[in-house]
Image (tube, rainbow, N blue to C red):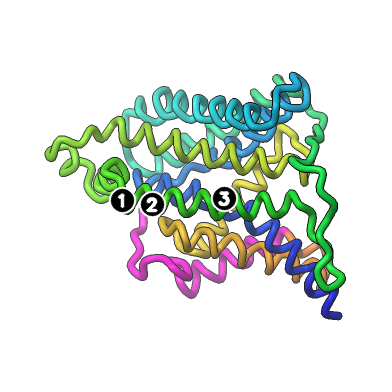
Amino acid sequence: MMQELLQYLFTGITSGAIYAIIAVGYSMLYNSTELINFAQGEFVMIGGMSLMTFWGVLKIPLPFSILLAVAVTALCGLIFERLAIRTAKKDNHVVLIIITVGASIFLRGAAMILWGKEPHSVAQFTSFPPINIGGAVIVFQSLWIIIGALIIAVALDFFYRRSLTGKAMTACAINMRAARLTGIPAGFMVLLAFVISSSTGAVAGSMIGPITMCSYDMGTVLGLKGFCAAMLGGLGSLWGSLAGGIILGILESLGAGYISSGVKDATAFLALLMILYFRPGGLFGKKDIKRF
C-alpha cells in the first residue's frame, strides 16, 4: 500500500515538474505583459523536437543540443512577438489572446510538415539506473526535470526581484504608458519577455522528450495543463506556478492510480474549474483579479 502510494507520488511529482516549467513560462510572460500566450505549449513542442533533431539525428553533444534547441525556440518566440503581437492593430487583450491561439495552430501545422506525424523518441540524458526508495522507483530523468524546474523558478525570481531589467519588465506590466514616460524601452521589454518565456518552454520540451515521445501535437495538452497549473498556483506567481504544477501532477497521478486512468486528463480541467469558482486568483496568487 505504502509502496503504491510512493510510486504514485514520484510519478505525480515528475509530471508536476513538467507542468510547473510550462506554468512558469505562462506566469513569466503574464508578469511582464499581462498577456496569456496559448502558443506556449507549441514552444514546448519546438524545444522537444529541436532537441531530437540536434541530439538524436545530427549527433551534436547533449549540452550544445539543449542550447541550440533553446536558441531555435527563443528565435521563434522573437519572430512571433515581432510579426504577430506587435503588429496587431488593437492591443486589446482578447484580440491578442486570439492571435496566440491562431499562432498555436500555425506552429502545430508547420511542425507536422517539418517533422512529420510520427512520434520520435529521445534518449535519457544519463544512463544511471533507476533509484529505488521504499520499493518505489524513480528514473534519473525525473530528477533532471525536478532540478530544472527549481533552477528556472529560482533564476526567474532572482531576475525579477534583483535585476534592473526584471523590475523594468514588471513596471511595463503594471502600466505600459507610465513605464515609457520614465524612459523604459517598453517594446524591448515585451520582446524580451517573449524570448524568455519561449526559452522556458524549450527547456521543458527538452526535458520531457526522454520520458514521453516527441510529436508535432505534444504541445496542445501540455500547454493546457501548464495553463491549469499556472491558474491553480496563481497566474503571475512564479513560486505559485511551481507549486500549482506539482499539486496538479500529484492529483493526476493519484486520480489515475486509485480511480481510473481515464480521469487523468479530466483532473487538470476539474481543478481549473474548481479554482476559478472558489479562488479565481489561485492558491498563491493575488486575491483581487481583473476580468478582460
Gap in angstroms between the C-alphas marked 1 and 3: 21 Å
Depth check: 155 or 224 in front? 155
Picture residue at 57% right of the left edge, 52% below the top: 149
Q: Name the residue carrying label 3.
A: 21
Q: Which mark is residue 158?
A: 2
Q: Is residue 168 above or below residue 263?
A: above
- Contact check, label 2 and label 1, Cβ < 8 Å: yes
Horizontal arrangement in the rendering, residue 44 relative to residue 15 (left or right)? left
**Residues shaded magenta:** 265-292
Q: Amino acid at mark 3?
A: Ile
Q: Quadrant of residue 172?
A: top left
Picture residue at 71% right of the left edge, 63% below the top: 12
Q: Name the residue carrying label 1.
A: 162
Crowding at dot 1, Cα within 10 Å, few <14 / some 14-19 / many 20+, comes out as: few
Q: Quadrant of residue 185?
A: top left
Picture residue at 20% right of the left edge, 36% below the top: 184
N-terminal-most mark, 1 or 3: 3
- Residue 6 covered by magenta stretch: no
Q: Is residue 283 above or below residue 54?
A: below
SS of the residue under disc 2: helix
